[in-house]
Image: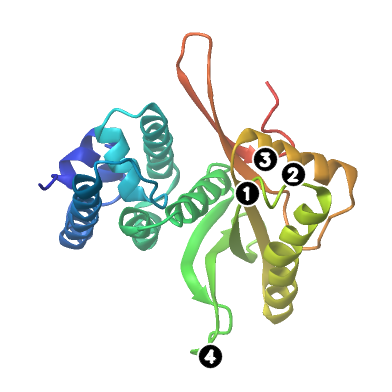
């Protein structure tokens, strides 16, 4: 059994085809990978006739949406609105720069698809201010070294004419790594402190690290409480952002992507 992934995405994420030119994406790879993964999972189910857990992935979200899962449809609604805003906030040449970021979302076979969504959501929040221009994506930190790591975005401040290197670090929260303040601090040391100390030291331009937390509102609240009761503040690191979906009294979907210190404000 095969699904027409492209037309499914036109239903669930129509803004994708406004953001990125349809013929600029390798649909052959996307469709082949999705159907291969779907058939593998379907075969496993046919053999066991028992439900089983799989790693979270963009493929899984598509499958769940096809089956009418409300959480998957809610996430697609968020992604569609994100892509629509990016179309409005980016110039044509800037949209071309993020083509690979979008492709990475569509072909991701694990929960890393959220990392790519996080990068784009963060970029959107910056670009909607109108104060910046996107110059480069995945620029080498040390341009003369082929072994150098890459920086997610290079931005130009229109007012000061200064360039900034913006790196996104995605942190996936769980009951285990947020169970107490000690574990939260260890998580932040591993994911944030070590990265900023190394990267900022090597950078010759202004460097900014943006942490993004993924997890339930319960885990997000635990991290927020940690930040409010400790002094975990690092130079070159912005207040972490996160995504939390809500519903209004009429059942309409509301998406919030912003800093953890404002995300719960009405």
Within 10 Å of the Cα at label 3, are there few (<14), some (14-19), or many (20+) other Cα atoms? many
Q: Of label 4 and label 1, which has the lower sequence position?
A: 4
| Numbered label attached to residue 173 | 1
At a point 60% along the width and 64% down the height, the residue shown is 167
Helix, strand or loop status at disc 4: loop
Report which residue position mark 4 lands on: 145
Instruction: Measure the C-alpha gap from mark 2 to mark 1.
Output: 9 Å
Within 10 Å of the Cα at label 1, are there few (<14), some (14-19), or many (20+) other Cα atoms? some
Report which residue position mark 3 lands on: 219
At a point 45% along the width and 16% down the height, the residue shown is 252
At a point 33% along the width and 46% down the height, the residue shown is 60
Q: Of label 1 and label 3, which has the lower sequence position?
A: 1
Instruction: Measure the C-alpha gap from mark 4 to mark 1.
Output: 34 Å
Q: Of label 3 and label 4, which has the lower sequence position?
A: 4
Report which residue position mark 2 lands on: 223
Q: Of label 2 and label 1, which has the lower sequence position?
A: 1
Q: Is residue 140 left or right of residue 221?
A: left
Q: Of label 2 and label 4, which has the lower sequence position?
A: 4
- Circles 3 and 2, Cβ within 8 Å, touching? The answer is yes
Instruction: Measure the C-alpha gap from mark 3 to mark 4.
Output: 39 Å
- Which of the two marks, 3 or 4, is nearer to us in this view? 3
Q: Can you say whether 251 is above or below 88 in the image?
A: above
- Circles 4 and 1, Cβ within 8 Å, touching? The answer is no
């Amino acid at each position: 059994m095969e699904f027409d992934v492209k037309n499914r995405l036109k239903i669930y994420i129509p803004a994708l085809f406004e953001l990125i030119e349809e013929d600029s994406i390798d649909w052959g790879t996307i469709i082949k990978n999705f159907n291969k993964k779907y058939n593998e999972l379907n075969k496993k189910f046919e053999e066991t006739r028992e439900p089983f857990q799989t790693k979270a992935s963009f493929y899984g979200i598509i499958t769940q949406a096809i089956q009418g899962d409300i959480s998957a449809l809610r996430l697609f609604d968020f992604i569609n609105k994100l892509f629509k805003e990016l179309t409005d906030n980016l110039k044509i040449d800037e949209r071309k720069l993020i083509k690979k970021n979008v492709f990475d979302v569509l072909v991701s076979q694990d929960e890393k698809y959220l990392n790519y969504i996080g990068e784009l959501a963060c970029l959107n929040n910056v670009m909607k201010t109108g104060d910046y221009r996107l110059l480069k994506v995945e620029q080498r930190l040390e341009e003369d070294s082929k072994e150098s790591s890459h920086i997610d975005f290079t931005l130009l401040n229109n007012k000061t004419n200064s360039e900034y290197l913006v790196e996104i670090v995605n942190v996936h929260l769980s009951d285990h790594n947020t169970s107490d303040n000690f574990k939260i601090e260890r998580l932040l040391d591993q994911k944030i402190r070590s990265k900023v100390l190394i990267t900022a030291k090597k950078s010759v331009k202004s460097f900014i690290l943006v942490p993004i937390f993924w997890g339930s509102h319960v885990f997000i609240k635990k991290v927020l409480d940690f930040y409010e009761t400790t002094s975990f503040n690092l130079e070159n690191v912005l207040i972490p952002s996160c995504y939390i979906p809500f519903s209004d009294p009429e059942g309409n979907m509301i998406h919030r992507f912003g800093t953890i210190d404002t995300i719960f404000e009405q």
